[in-house]
Structure formats: structure tokens, C-alpha cells
Amino acid sequence: MIQQTLIEDHNRRTSTANLRKRYGLHLIDWRMRNLLVSDILVRFCEQIPYAFVVLWCVNRNGITPLQFGILTTIEMVTAMLVYIPVAVLADKTTKKPFVAITFGFFTLFPLILSISRTFWMMVIAFIIRGLKEFGEPTRKALIMDLGPEDRKAATFGLYYLIRDVIVSLAAFGGALLWDSSTAQAIGDSFGLGPGLAAFFEGFASPQTNFLTAFGFGVLGTFYFILFGRDLGSAKN
């Protein structure tokens, strides 16, 4: 009986290993899995409010289209200013602190935006949004560092495939959290009646959207701080 159990356990492990190898999942080791989990949580933070930022600024708070264009320009200029110096610094030390900081900026943006009602408050929010690029080149370099030496391109592609497939759900979830109109449309389309819309109407709002995004960002950032590794620290 014990021998039979050991054989079944061995066969199960072999089958799982073969399945992982078949779909390339063996390329993502435990260090990269920790980075991937953190990245997914933080990208939920980014994508939940992503489509609704312009609605918050223009429709809800009276920012003009021209002003919103200026805010976007401020975001892009901020991102450009931090790219090169941070990339140079990251090559001289370990990459984990830079990735953790950029996750922090992802997290702060929806929180700051949720309390922004004037153009100048939104300038601060969009500077923070630009600073989320602080460690993006470093994060991509970290993925390459952690990938197998002879399969780095395949690992990079697999990482992004897994991340983006999962994170694509965030935009849909963000619509449900913004207001009850999405739930109403789903109820009408599938004949679910008014119950679904009534459920979301009780709590769906821009603040719910932003704070939920902030919560995902906090989870992702602290997960990476606790469990994230880079190549340098993994060797020590």
C-alpha cells in the first residue's frame, strides 16, 4: 500500500512537471513567481481606475480638455526625466529597491487622485503617475536577470502573457466599481433583473474604485517588499 502510494505520488509529480514544461511554466522559478504575483496586484491597482481617470478629471471635477492634456504632458515629462538616471543607478546596485519604489508610486496615484478636486492637486497626482516609471526599466531588467540564461526571451514573453491575461479582468471590474450602470447593462443583457444593479448601487462609486485600486497596490507592494528577490540578493 505504501509502495503504491509512493508510485502514484511520483507519477503525479512527473505529470505536473511535464505539464509545466510543455507550456513553458518551468521557466518561471520561485523568485520570478514572487515578482509576478506582486506585479499582477500592482497592475490591478493601475487598471481598475485607468479608463475612468479622464471621467474623474473632466466630468466630475470640471477640468477642461486642454487642462487634461497639460496633466498628461506633465506625466510624460516626469517619466522621461526619471528614466535614464534611475536606470544608471540601478545598474550599480541591486534592483529590488527601485522596483519597490515604483510599485509605491503606482499605489499612491489612485489615493491622491481620489482627493484631488482642483487642477493643481491633479498636477501633484499626475507627477506621481509619471514617477511610476521610476523603476519600470529596472523591473524589466530584473525579469531578464531571473530568466534562464538560454531562454530569456521566452521567459519574458511568458511572464507578460500570464500577467496581462489576468490583469485584463481589472478593467471590467473597475467599471462595476465605478457606478451601477455596468451592472445594469449586464443584468439587462442576461436577464438577471434589477438585483445585480441594486447590489452594486449600494457601494459603487469613484471613491470605491480608487480605494479598491489603492488596496491592491498596497498588497502588491508589501508582497514584493517581503518576498521579492533580485539576482544579487539571491546569490548572497
Image (cartoon, grey):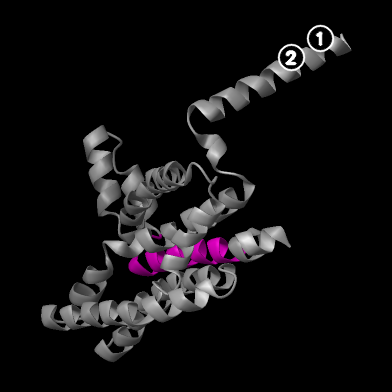
Q: What amino acid type is highlighted by mark number 2?
A: Glu
Q: Which residue is mark 2?
A: 8
Q: Is residue 19 visible?
A: yes
Residue 156, percent from left and from top: 43, 48
Residue 124, percent from left and from top: 35, 86
Inter-mark Cα distance, 2 to 1:
6 Å
Q: Name the residue at 42% across, 58% down.
A: 43
Asked which secondary structure carries label 2, the reply is helix
Q: What amino acid type is highlighted by mark number 1?
A: Gln
Residue 62, percent from left and from top: 18, 81
Q: Name the residue at 61% across, 59% down.
A: 231
Q: Is disc 2 in contact with disc 1, using a CB cutoff of under 8 Å? A: yes
What segment is highlighted magenta in the picture? Answer: 203-222
Q: Main secondary structure of the magenta part?
A: helix
Q: Which residue is mark 1?
A: 4
Looking at this view, name the residue that lies furthest to the front: 150
Q: Give the quarter of the figure containing the C terminus.
A: bottom right
